[in-house]
């Protein structure tokens, strides 16, 4: 029997401790870089889960998370994070593919996201996937880059 691979599913309340661990590990290094707590470390994941906005990538354990929020004419990819110990397996690509497919399935013509200016590796990944920068702004003391991909 072949391994079906990881599953992307709605998060359950039991997943919340793993979600918190992944977020802390994935974003914690940026606190030291700019002295500010990134937005994903401030989020209320229990509320996201209850609202049906939190998804997890599970390969026997939760390895990645995705927060998707339907907006007016777009899907906001509010957060995508992979456990640093599980990076390099294509899980980030799988989550981005899932977000884009979800937008298409719900009839939304675009995916929007934002990231911090200091997260240059993320900006490069998004640009390579067809996301274009729309603007920059400072919010909550964080210098953010906003991007969009038309589907």
Image: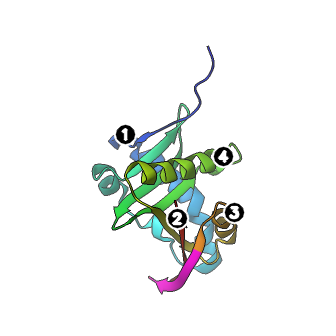
- Spatial CA span between label 4 and label 2: 32 Å
The span from disc 1 to disc 4 (Cα, nearest Å) is: 21 Å
Question: What is the CA distance from the residue labelled 3 to the residue labelled 2?
Answer: 14 Å
Query: Which dot marks residue 128?
Result: 3
Counting residues from the start of the chain, the first of labels 1 and 4 encountered is 1
Residue at image location 50% in from the left, 73% down from the top: 37
Side of 1 where 114 appears, left or right: left
Q: Is residue 144 visible?
A: no
Q: Position of residue 94 (x, y in %)?
A: 59, 45
**What is the crowding at mark 3: few (fewer than 14 residues within 10 Å), some, or many (at least 20)?**
few
Residue denoted by label 2: 150
Picture coordinates of residue 126, whole percent (x, y):
63, 64
The numbered dot on residue 49 is: none
Residue 78 picture quarter: bottom left
Q: Which residues are magenta?
A: 133-139
Q: Earlier in the sequence, mark 3 or mark 2?
A: 3
| Residue 98 falls inside the magenta stretch | no
């Amino acid at each position: 029997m072949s391994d079906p691979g990881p599953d992307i599913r709605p998060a359950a309340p039991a997943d919340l401790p793993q979600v918190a661990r992944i977020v802390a590990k994935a974003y914690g290094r940026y606190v030291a870089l700019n002295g500010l707590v990134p937005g994903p470390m401030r989020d209320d994941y229990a509320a996201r889960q209850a609202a049906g906005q939190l998804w997890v990538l599970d390969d026997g354990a939760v390895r990645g998370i995705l927060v998707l929020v339907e907006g007016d004419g777009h899907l906001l990819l509010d957060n995508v994070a992979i456990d640093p110990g599980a990076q390099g397996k294509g899980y980030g690509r799988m989550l981005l593919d899932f977000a884009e497919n979800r937008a298409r399935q719900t009839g939304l013509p675009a995916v929007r996201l934002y990231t911090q200016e200091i997260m240059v590796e993320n900006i490069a990944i998004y640009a390579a996937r067809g996301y274009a920068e729309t603007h920059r702004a400072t919010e909550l003391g964080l210098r953010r880059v906003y991007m969009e991909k038309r589907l």
